[in-house]
Image (cartoon, helix red, strand yellow):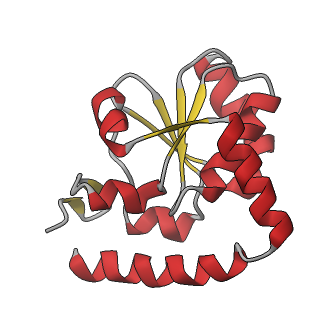
Amino acid sequence: MKSLHSELQKYAKKCDEILLSKKLKKLVEEANLQVEQISAKKLDKIKENVVVIDVREPEEFASGYIPAKTVLTIPRGKLEFAAIEKIAKEFREDAQIVTYCLKGARGSLAALQLKKLGFSNVSNLKGGILAWLEKKYTIKNYLGEFKPV
């Protein structure tokens, strides 16, 4: 588990380079202001009562995801197209939704897009799955459940 966390942190550093773009950084900051940012502690308390949407790419999801009663994996690039079929039709537009990604930026952008699409109860996990791991909460993948040490 420790090596997975290390690899995710290395990947996060690469993501920081992308965020250096001033325009992208501004978009993320605007999204952060317009979307409620919840803590890992709060998500852990409500995870059985919300729709959790992992907006990372499939290979990122395969490395481990936040276990909740309802977890959807919808990559950020496909969110707008999948929102009606995967979210609205099954859970309604007023369902409580929490998005997340690796560090929080894609999750915030995704949450803002969902709000623009008419979803009324959307928030984002501040700091993404890395914040979840920092709090030593369990993640799950095809091998089972893992708790960071």
| Farthest-out residue, right | 23
Q: Which residue is found at the position 68% from the left and 40% from the top?
A: 33
Whether residue 33 can be seen here: yes
Front residue (pair 44, 85): 44
Image coordinates of residue 108 in percent, x first then y, are 64, 47
Q: Is residue 102 left or right of residue 19?
A: left
Residue 39 sits above or below residue 133 on the image: above
Q: Is residue 42 left or right of residue 60?
A: left
Count of numbered circles in the view: 0
Whether residue 111 can be seen here: no
Image quadrant holding the C terminus, namely bottom left
Q: Which residue is found at the position 40% from the left and 42% from the top?
A: 39
Q: Which residue is found at the position 73% from the left and 77% from the top?
A: 20
Image coordinates of residue 37 in percent, x first then y, are 53, 39
Q: Is residue 19 left or right of residue 117?
A: left
Image quadrant holding the N terminus, namely bottom left
Residue 137 sits above or below residue 112 on the image: below
Image quadrant in which you'd find residue 91: top right
Image quadrant in which you'd find residue 46: top left
Q: Which residue is found at the position 25% from the left and 65% from the top?
A: 143
Image coordinates of residue 65 in percent, x first then y, are 39, 55
Image coordinates of residue 69 in percent, x first then y, are 35, 32
| Farthest-out residue, left | 149
